[in-house]
Image (cartoon, helix red, strand yellow):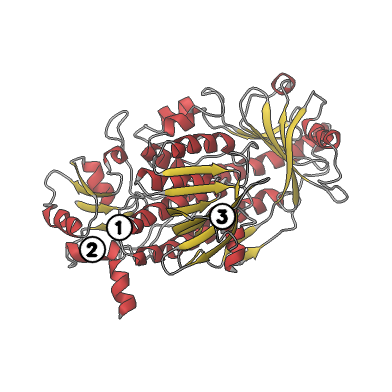
């Protein structure tokens, strides 16, 4: 620490990193009145499209915070299909297509009663750059939050009562000191915070695949003639599958902006490629030459399946890419980062405001690290499925050999697309069964796989959802913090639990729901829901724990006694 003569600014939480994880955490803390400073060395939110799939669970959190509709208005026009389509080249043979509705139709379909599972919000195909802008606007609107782009963390140390940090403005200017009760590093894959803590990534840093297994060139480009030149129905995601140039491209605005990614071949280098060279790679995938403007370019490494060995130490925590790196098949990295922020947000707020003991924070790594391992494993499976399947030499030939090769590829790619893009298990099925702050009931967990989701009232997972009418979700009745559901026509009294919550400083909303479907889903008549919409406890006939004992477990107070013992 060098800024000894500078008066230190104080705050509850200092967030380092203004991407989705950091901004979401700022919103969670701001909504709970926690003094928060967010810094990021970038000048503003992302310009590049980056992630482009916001899963249903993330959209449910945006609904909980009140801006899901604002997010849904971003990105592609509401009628634009979100199909995933595979071609030899974008203007040549179509091999397979996985049809998906536009945002307007998706919002209608999500309310159908005959769905295998129910969600309060459908997934939305929108580039991260738009999401970050919305998250920042809402973080800026919170009186207790200060968002400061253009500032870099250069040093920090934990003290007896908090964390003291030194930050400097990018370019020029005097350093400043910030004293925070807690520090959160959401500062990406090259995380300064993680490196200073001495934490290391574990897992696979690279992979040898024909695609999604090496250096990828990313182009954010404008090609206004693309839709006129492409003879196929519109899609959200376009895959080029041939032996010369494999690529994947996402539509950004539905008018002519795209995020194009191709794996560089031996002898190709991102640093040595001019913009004209980069456009030539796009032309190979396109199959014809059209006018293209490169808006920005970058390089990244595909094939990574990495999770940090630690997520927290003392008063310092990590989230997002700082602790897990994905190959982006399945769109899992950004969505996992949002869940990190949601999980940590209510816990930090409880401790900073004095409503929960610091031991509650010990559950963050115990809950989120197993999920990161699970999710990076799912993404690796998808990357192997698409990346190890090589195009046949006959794929682009005329005649019977070419047609047969295209049929075989189409069948494989169609099956792959169903497995990668219909993933309710990944989206909704993550669980915290081993968490010390879940008051479990001993019932077996449901199956866990990316394509399978079984709603269950078993503590440790997302609360089952149902629609109460055409527009009203059960989730809309939940309190912003804790919720006690009384289900069925004759639910038991909640008075003892309300009184126990009052004694422990827990903000509790009691919700009555007589819908028979709700009682069937939860398999009980009394359920305690955490602020992150995860079931913390449910009443069973063999549970002898008192309300005080239940709240002691779920708020981390029981952990204090365990450590003292």
Q: CA distance from mark 3 to mark 2?
A: 33 Å
Name the residue beneath numbered marker 3: 378
Q: Earlier in the sequence, mark 3 or mark 2?
A: 3
Q: Earlier in the sequence, mark 2 or mark 1?
A: 1
Q: Which secondary structure lies at badge 3?
A: helix
Name the residue beneath numbered marker 2: 550
- 565 on left or right of 190: left
Q: CA distance from mark 3 to mark 1?
A: 26 Å
The quarter of the picture where the C terminus appears is bottom left
Does residue 315 lie above or below 563 as drawn?
above
How many neighbours does mark 2 have within 10 angstroms: few (below 14), some (14-19), or many (20 or more)? many
Q: CA distance from mark 2 to mark 1?
A: 9 Å
- 455 on left or right of 272: left
The quarter of the picture where the N terminus appears is bottom right
Residue at image x 58%, y 62%?
194
Q: Which secondary structure lies at badge 1?
A: strand
- 514 on left or right of 338: left
Q: 163 or 552: nearer the eye?
A: 163
Residue at image x 48%, y 34%?
137
Q: 220 or 438: nearer the eye?
A: 220
Name the residue beneath numbered marker 1: 536
Residue 422: give x, y in percent of width and height.
52, 42
Q: 417 or 70: nearer the eye?
A: 70
View extreme (front): residue: 5
Does residue 229 lie above or below 241 as drawn?
above
Q: Which mark is residue 150?
A: none
Query: Between tags 3 and 2, which lies in front?
Result: 2
Does residue 487 lie above or below 198 as drawn?
above
Does residue 356 lie above or below 19 as drawn?
below
């Amino acid at each position: 620490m060098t800024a000894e003569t500078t008066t230190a600014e104080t705050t509850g939480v200092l967030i380092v990193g203004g991407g989705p994880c950091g901004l979401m955490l700022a919103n969670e803390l701001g909504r709970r009145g926690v003094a928060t400073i967010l810094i990021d060395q970038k000048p503003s939110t992302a310009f590049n499209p980056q992630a482009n799939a916001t899963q249903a669970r993330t959209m449910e959190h945006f609904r909980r915070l009140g801006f899901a509709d604002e997010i849904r208005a971003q990105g592609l026009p509401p009628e634009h299909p979100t199909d995933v389509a595979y071609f030899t080249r974008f203007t040549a043979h179509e091999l397979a297509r996985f049809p998906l509705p536009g945002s307007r139709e998706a919002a209608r379909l999500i309310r159908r009663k005959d769905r295998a599972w129910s969600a309060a919000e459908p997934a939305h195909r929108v580039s991260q750059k738009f999401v970050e802008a919305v998250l920042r606007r809402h973080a800026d609107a919170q009186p207790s939050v200060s968002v400061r782009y253009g500032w870099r963390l250069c040093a920090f140390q934990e003290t007896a009562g908090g964390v003291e940090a030194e930050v400097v403005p990018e370019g020029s200017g005097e350093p400043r000191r910030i004293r925070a009760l807690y520090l959160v590093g959401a500062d990406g894959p090259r995380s300064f915070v993680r490196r200073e803590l001495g934490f290391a990534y574990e897992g696979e840093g690279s992979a040898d695949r024909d695609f999604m297994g090496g250096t990828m060139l990313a182009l954010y480009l404008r090609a206004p003639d693309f839709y006129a030149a492409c003879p196929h129905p519109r899609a959200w995601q376009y895959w080029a599958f041939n032996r010369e140039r494999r690529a994947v491209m996402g539509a950004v605005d539905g008018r002519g902006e795209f995020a194009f990614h191709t794996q560089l071949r031996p002898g190709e280098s991102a640093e040595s490629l001019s913009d004209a060279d980069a456009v030539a790679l796009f032309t190979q995938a396109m199959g014809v030459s059209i006018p293209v403007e490169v808006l920005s370019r970058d390089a990244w490494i595909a094939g990574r399946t990495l999770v940090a060995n630690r997520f927290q130490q003392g008063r310092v925590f990590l989230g997002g890419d700082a602790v897990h790196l994905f190959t982006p098949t399945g769109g899992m990295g950004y969505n996992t980062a949002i869940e990190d922020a949601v999980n940590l947000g209510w816990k930090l707020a409880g401790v900073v405001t004095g409503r929960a003991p610091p031991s509650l924070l010990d559950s963050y790594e115990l809950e989120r690290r197993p999920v990161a391992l699970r999710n990076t494993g799912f993404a690796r499976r998808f990357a192997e499925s698409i990346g190890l399947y090589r195009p046949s030499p006959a794929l682009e030939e005329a005649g019977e050999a070419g047609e047969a090769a295209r049929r075989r590829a189409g069948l494989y790619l169609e099956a792959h697309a169903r497995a990668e893009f219909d993933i309710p298990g990944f989206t909704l099925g993550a669980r915290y069964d081993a968490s010390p702050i879940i008051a479990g009931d001993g019932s077996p967990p449901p199956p866990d796989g990316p394509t399978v989701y079984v709603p269950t009232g078993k503590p440790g997972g997302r609360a089952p959802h149902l629609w109460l009418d055409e527009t009203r979700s059960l989730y809309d009745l939940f309190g912003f913090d804790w919720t006690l559901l009384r289900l069925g026509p004759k639910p038991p009294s909640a008075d003892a639990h309300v009184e126990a919550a009052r004694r422990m400083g827990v903000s509790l909303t009691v919700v009555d729901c007589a819908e028979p479907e709700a009682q069937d889903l939860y398999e009980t008549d009394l359920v305690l829901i955490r602020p992150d919409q995860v079931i913390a406890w449910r009443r069973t006939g063999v549970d002898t724990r008192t309300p005080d004992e239940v709240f002691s477990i779920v708020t981390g107070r029981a952990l204090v006694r365990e450590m003292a013992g």
